[in-house]
Image: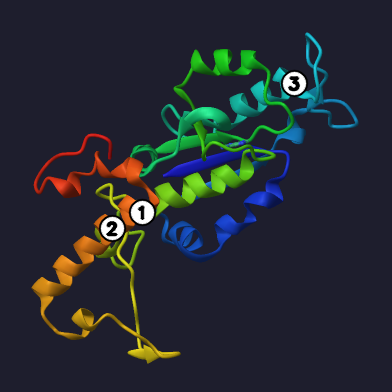
């Protein structure tokens, strides 16, 4: 999977060199390139923003640097990329959406700042490639960079060969619409608190039933909105949300 990221803060994306995403790049599963939007402005101040038509607070990102950056980045890979623009006005990132991103061969991420990118950039881009606006959730960040870190991590860990232990992908929160069960490790007693005895029983059937019950209770307590749609409630059932 190839990911090109355009930002006015390229350093923000440095964490992608760490840990599993870093390993995935060294293994050749993931190819990340970060581009500085200011390299595509032509004045000596490297300007990328201007005041909004119609008035109002803040600044808007100019179309020209964005378009030149996108045209340049589009020459770097093979085939047609999908353009992802992080923004609070987009579809919300879910595990299903992360899987859709992981299925793509090439993603370009356009990190907006200030009040956003001139709308004509979205229109021009949509003439030459699929464009998706994706939100991390219903709150406002200062720019798209943190959202891109989350999107690439959520997608890259689903790439075949990325995780050492693919089983942990199957059992984790959101894979079937339920939250994860609580986990414990040694010692069996810590600060006077015991590990639930069933986990020490060696009875795999009882352990599985207990974990399933914990997942249901947790989901009901923390995310009741997830419960009615979960495929885990209808064994063998297909949950088209995930
Ligand atoms: N940029 C600003 N707010 C955002 C959000 N909630 N998700 C993604 N990108 C953003």
Q: Distance between the residues labelled 2 and 3?
A: 49 Å
Q: Earlier in the sequence, mark 1 or mark 3?
A: 3
* Residue 81 or residue 211, whichever sits in front: 211
- Quadrant of the image containing the C terminus: top left
CB within 8 Å, label 1 to label 3: no
- The residue tagged with tag 2: helix, strand or loop? helix
Residue 241 drawn at (x, y percent): 27, 35
The yes-or-no answer for disc 2 within 8 Å of ligand 1 is: no
Label placed on residue 198: none
Label placed on residue 62: 3
Tell me which corner region of the image, top left, top right, bottom left or bottom right, holds residue 161.
bottom left
Q: Earlier in the sequence, mark 2 or mark 3?
A: 3
Residue drawn at x 50%, y 32% is 134
Residue bearing the label numbered 1: 221
Give the residue at the far right of this rendering.
44
Tell me which corner region of the image, top left, top right, bottom left or bottom right, holds residue 157.
bottom left
CB within 8 Å, label 1 to label 2: yes
The yes-or-no answer for disc 3 within 8 Å of ligand 1 is: no
Label placed on residue 217: 2
* Residue 126 or residue 228, whichever sits in front: 228
- The residue tagged with tag 1: helix, strand or loop? helix
* Residue 213 or residue 155, whichever sits in front: 213
Residue 101 drawn at (x, y percent): 39, 39
Give the residue at the far top of this rendering.
54
Q: How busy is the neighbourhood of tag 3: few (under 14 within 10 Å), some, or many (20 plus)?
A: many
Asked whether residue 121 appears in the rendered view, the answer is yes
């Amino acid at each position: 999977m190839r990911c090109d990221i355009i930002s006015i803060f390229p350093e923000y994306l440095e964490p992608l060199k760490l840990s599993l995403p870093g390993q995935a790049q060294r293994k050749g599963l993931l190819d990340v390139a970060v581009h500085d939007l200011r390299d595509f402005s032509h004045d000596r101040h490297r300007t990328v923003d201007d005041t909004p038509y119609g008035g109002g607070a803040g600044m808007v990102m100019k179309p020209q640097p964005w378009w030149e950056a996108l045209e340049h980045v589009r020459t770097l890979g093979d085939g047609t990329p999908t353009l992802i623009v992080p923004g609070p006005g987009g579809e919300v990132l879910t595990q299903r959406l992360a899987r859709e991103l992981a299925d793509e061969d090439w993603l370009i991420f356009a990190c907006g700042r200030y009040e956003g990118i001139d709308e004509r950039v979205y229109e021009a881009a949509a003439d030459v490639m699929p464009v998706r606006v994706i939100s991390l959730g219903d709150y406002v960040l200062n720019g798209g960079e943190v959202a891109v870190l989350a999107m690439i991590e959520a997608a890259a860990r689903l790439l075949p060969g990325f995780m050492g232990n693919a089983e942990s992908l199957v059992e984790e929160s959101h894979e079937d619409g339920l939250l994860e069960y609580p986990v414990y490790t040694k010692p069996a007693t810590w600060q006077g608190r015991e590990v639930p005895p069933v986990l020490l029983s060696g009875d795999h059937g009882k352990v599985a039933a207990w974990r399933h019950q914990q997942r249901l209770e947790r989901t009901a307590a923390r995310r009741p909105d997830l419960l009615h749609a979960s495929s885990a409630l209808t064994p063998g059932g297909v949950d088209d949300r995930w």
